[in-house]
Amino acid sequence: MVFQEFVKGEYVHMKRAVFLDRDGTINQEKEYLYRIEDFEFVPGAPEAIRILNDAGFLVVVVTNQSGVARGYYGEEDVETLHRHIAAELERSGARVDAWLYCPHHPDGKGSYALPCRCRKPLPGMLVDAAVRFGIDLSASVMIGDKRIDVEAAMAAGCRPVLVRSGYGSGEEKLMPPGVDVYDDLYAAAVRLQSR
């Protein structure tokens, strides 16, 4: 689905996106996940992503990967896992349109040990995706299992959605008023599809 926004006398095509956290939202939460053999979808996640694809949303994963900064694994490990997830999704007829991750952490090592604008709850990954892919942030949604996902959504001007998978059931009580909460990504996708 394509949205239009009138800017300076011209129509500019703006797209709606669903930004997805990765760990605890798409896959089962496992601390510092990077090995393919440890990867496991949250039940219904591939079907949920297919629903979002069919509804015309761009699907963009935005994930903090501080394990890189901490020296637990490298960027190539993150990218290898993302290729694996993409291949698994393809078997279910689903796709992620873009993968963005933040490898930084202020307490990390080397060149990754820095404060940055991409680490959630800051909105850098969402804003960068909007610029690169022509996304209308005000018409888009961010789904995640942590308060930092909700805060990143709000900072970017997206609609925040919390899921109870991963850390979500424990984070629910921390949500500001007006944040939609669903059991999992599948339940959220079904609801978004119907809007």
Image (cartoon, helix red, strand yellow):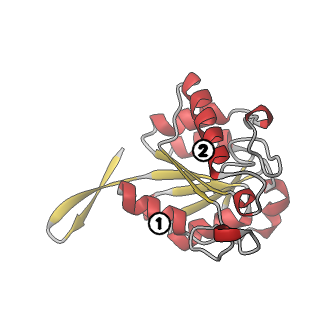
Kind of residue at disc 2: Glu
Residue 178 visible: no
Q: Secondary structure under badge 1?
A: helix
- Judged left or right of residue 179, residue 172 is right
- Judged left or right of residue 128, residue 170 is right
Name the residue at 62% across, 39% down.
80
Query: Residue 171, image x and y in percent?
Result: 80, 62
| Furthest residue in direction left, as rendered | 9
The reply to whether dot 1 and dot 2 touch (C-beta < 8 Å) is no
In the image shown, does 119 or 51 lie closer to the viewer?
A: 119
121 in relation to 59, above or below: below
In the image shown, does 38 or 151 lie closer to the viewer?
A: 38
23 in relation to 122, above or below: above
In the image shown, does 123 or 151 lie closer to the viewer?
A: 123
Kind of residue at disc 1: Val
Residue marked by disc 2: 79
Query: Residue 86, image x and y in percent?
Result: 57, 34
Sequence-first disc among 1 and 2: 2
Mark 1 is surrounded, within 10 Å at the Cα level, by few (under 14), some (14 to 19) or many (20 or more) other residues, namely: many
Mark 2 is surrounded, within 10 Å at the Cα level, by few (under 14), some (14 to 19) or many (20 or more) other residues, namely: some
Query: Residue 103, image x and y in percent?
Result: 64, 61
Query: Residue 141, image x and y in percent?
Result: 53, 56
Residue marked by disc 1: 127
In the image shown, does 152 or 171 lie closer to the viewer?
A: 152
Figure quadrant of the N terminus: top left
105 in relation to 96, above or below: below
Count the numbered circles shown.
Answer: 2
